[in-house]
Amino acid sequence: MRRSADDRLFRISTGIFAAMVLALVAGIGFELWRQSSLSIAKFGFRFWTGRVWNPVSGEFGALPFIWGTLYSSLLALFLSTPIALGIAIYISELSPRLLRQPLSYLTELLAAIPSVVYGLWGVFVLTPIVRKLEMAVPEALRRTPFFSGPPLGVGMGMAAIILSIMVVPFTSSVAREILKNVPIAQREAAYALGATRWEAIKVAIGYGKTGIIGAVMLGLGRALGETMAVTMVIGNNPQVSTSLFAPQYTMAAVIANEFTEAADDLYLHALIEIGLLLFIITIFVNIISRFFLWSTKKRLVRA
Amino acid sequence: MPKLIRAAALIALVGCNQGEAPHSATSSPAAQTVAINGAGATFPNPIYSKWFSDYNKVHPEVRINYQPIGSGGGIKQLISQTVFFGATDGPMTDAQIKSAPGPIMHFPTVLGAVVPAYNLPNNPQLKFSGPLLADIFLGKVKKWNDPAIAKVNPGVALPNLDLTLVHRAEGSGTNYIFCDFLSKVSPEFKQKVGVSTSVSWPGGVGGKGNEGVSGLVKQTPGAIGYVELIYASQNNIPYGAVQNAAGQFVRASLDSVTAAGASATMPADFRVSITNAPGKDAYPISSFTWILLYQNPTDKQRGRILVDFMRWALSDGQKDAAPLGYAPLPKQVIDVEMQALQKIQL
Amino acid sequence: MSNARIRKIISAIAESLCGLAVLIALVPLVLILFYVVKHGFTSLNWAFFTQMPKPVGEVGGGMANAIVGTLILIAIAALFAVPFGCLCGIHLSEYPASKFSSIVRFAADVLNGVPSIVVGIFAYGLVVLPVRRFSAMAGGFALGVLMIPVVVRTTEELLRLVPPGLREGALALGATRSRAVFSVIVPAALPGILTGILVATARVAGETAPLLFTSFNNRYWTTNIAQPMASLTVQVYTYANSPYEDWIRQAWAGAFLLVIIILVLSIIARVSVRRLERMNRP
């Protein structure tokens, strides 16, 4: 009887700490919403479609930042997914046993490098290279909306490249886990039917398809929230442009640059409202990816 | 104990590095260190960081931690009272002053110049007229060999390079000074962009701080940006001469900035603009830069220290201005300021 | 060419493309490490570790205050995150099936995905604004919030790995739940929990964004956590954005130090995870 009272105390006291984690998430959402109330009240839905970000006149529209964040992240996904999947496939299916640990460690190393170091390297090493590449783009392509504008080096293209490098290790390690858990029976069945190695791999991928989508979305979530490396190479210009050469702006970058100097309350609330949107979007992407991963896990465990 | 030893060792180290003998503190070595936090403009950061460091040598118990986050940031943090003093090169607007929890006073410290710095092969010496600069920064001039630039620079070989505009990414007094000048010489600029610490630039790349803009200009061929004089000269970035109100093309220098400052009639609250100043020797993009203090600070001890610092800066500190590319304040201004400092309620 | 032949060729091409992907991914890694080592290692000197930043434009000085600042910030973060995260993880592992636990688990996953700059805004509103001061406490709090989900998950996973025989044995001897957990199970899982803490620390050691408006920055040496404090990451960011050659050199040195710290932490973590996996394999 003393024992059950002790047990109950244990459950409640550890439960309080668990509840505080819950409170933290709810607290962040609540604080963001509360501290952006002025901006929400003033602009309403216009905030999401307004293109003008003008602290002087008090006109705040977040569209350029939303565009910049989505465009850079999607470009990064486009660049990183094939590479991440290739790595996952190679390490889990094709590589010699001995190489497996070192290779997986090396790809994880990419994830360990801090964002600011990526930015430093991006500015001083990669940007001059990218600038030369941009200047070498032929005139015919320059006329398309994807390559218009002066070749600066910094811009959407640079941001996409850096983001994709940063995202690769996340996507690939989760994809590798998925592939590792696909039952051997699937591949053996394929071989029994006379499949080549690649075709057997395709079967495995097909089986773990939802999980791989989940892995890709995890990478997307990472790219959406990335701040430092992006703000150092993206050019910091709030404009909506499809050109890879154009300097643009992301939600995280504008908060980092302008937060400490938003002199009036409306300005600060507008910035925090952008933070609120970023919060909601990343939660959303996270939930979807977890859902994909969870349903794959159930399927793999059952088989 | 270890902290004191550390502090003493540090003082000795810093003292030794400057080639001076370890100094004797004017107060007892066990005096409580007072940390004062300030934030604001990057424009005067080179001289402020020297001043705070030198003042710390004379008063080792005073540590003034100044963070150059931009004039907009300085004003904001001062109003929020997360820092004790601010610094700005764009004077506070009436609205900002009204939103502060207490009256704030502006104190000019030095005079400086904003120069148009650029990155071109062979570093040609270029001249700009006011309206030309406005057109460039409005995005109307796209290439360096545009006839508008060639007209003002006869005989100079201009490359067929795209112009890349570099502006400030955050709220900046340097921004304010530059836009103030451009708005005076170009009604279109005034209407389209306006004057403030934070404006909406039509295109171009944003750099953080004077440091960021000079860094970007230095790395990007064909770039043009606006920075405080010292950032261009310390980093060997070529900058152009600008045409002043009297029609002369003047390069920023100690003399030309001083000439601009001499023409100012100083109002009682010290908020004055000297861009496009009259006089044939005046550099047209000059400005005072101010330190912002609450007239009635809640922390009297820090208030006293800062007032003492201001007196030091306005007397001993002024000799540091010229070597760093700033112009010292005119004597009349200093006299009026010393008087105004007494208004701070301690 | 027969169908089988074509398929074999396609297979070979596809496989080599995968190998190519690995090489492509390794190129930036090698380049980054190469340049960080090349520029950073040569810029490390005794002054870097012992001196404060010099006034603008003067050559020399170091990042002593930033190095100590980063260590202090991590310590504050761990002090906050470890008890919270561990106790939460213990609850989740002891009552894994309850509705409450699944909600908390979900919340921890959500917290894991929140961008660090958003956490910085939260910390600003909670710790900076009410006292009107930037402080190391605020920065440490932000980093702690970022650490919590990692600590929660690894604690839960590792406690579950402990062989059930251990718990049953303890309970059979008449121990209360809390006794069983704290005296038997946690010590058994301790190496794993510590590994999780290391992993979480490695993650936050490299964070910059949330510190920009919480711990802010400080030119001086200070260990006072109620004052703004310099940190390695913010200092590297500040210097990287400047045109001064000397500052950029020091930025590389700071980057090098950061990478070394994180590398060491993650190597230790990885090695001990492998040891644990081997130990707990039935």
Image (cartoon, coloured by chain):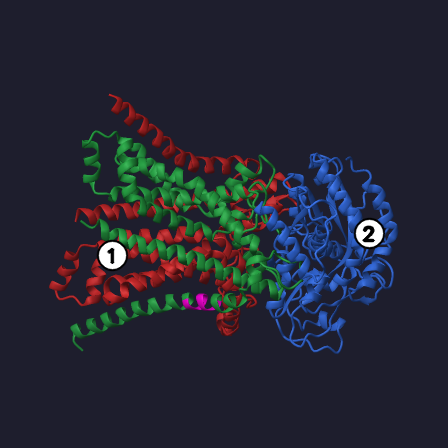
Asked whether B56 falls inside the magenta stretch, the response is: no
Residue A3 rendering spot, x and y as whole percentages:
25, 24
The residues bearing labels 2 and 1 have C-alpha atoms spaced at a distance of 73 Å
In the rendered image of the structure, the colour used to display chain C is: green
User: Bounds of the magenta span?
Assistant: C30-35
| Image x and y of residue C239, in percent | 58, 59
Residue C143 in percent (x, y) is at 47, 45
| Residue tagged 2 | B315
> In the figure, what tint was chain B given?
blue
Output the chain of dot 1.
A
- Secondary structure of the magenta portion, mostly? helix
Nearer the observer: mark 2 or 1; the answer is: 2
Q: Amino acid at mark 2?
A: Ser
Q: Which mark is residue A179?
A: 1
Can you say which quadrant of the picture contains the N terminus of chain C?
bottom left
Quick check: marks 2 and 1 in contact, CB under 8 Å?
Answer: no
Please name whichever residue, B158 or C99, is drawn nearer the observer in this view of the structure. C99
Could you tell me which secondary element the residue under label 1 belongs to?
Answer: helix
Picture coordinates of residue A14, whole percent (x, y): 34, 32
Tally of numbered discs: 2
Magenta run includes residue C32:
yes
Give the quarter of the image for residue B220.
bottom right
Q: Is residue B250 above or below residue B65?
A: below
Question: Type of residue at label 1?
Answer: Leu
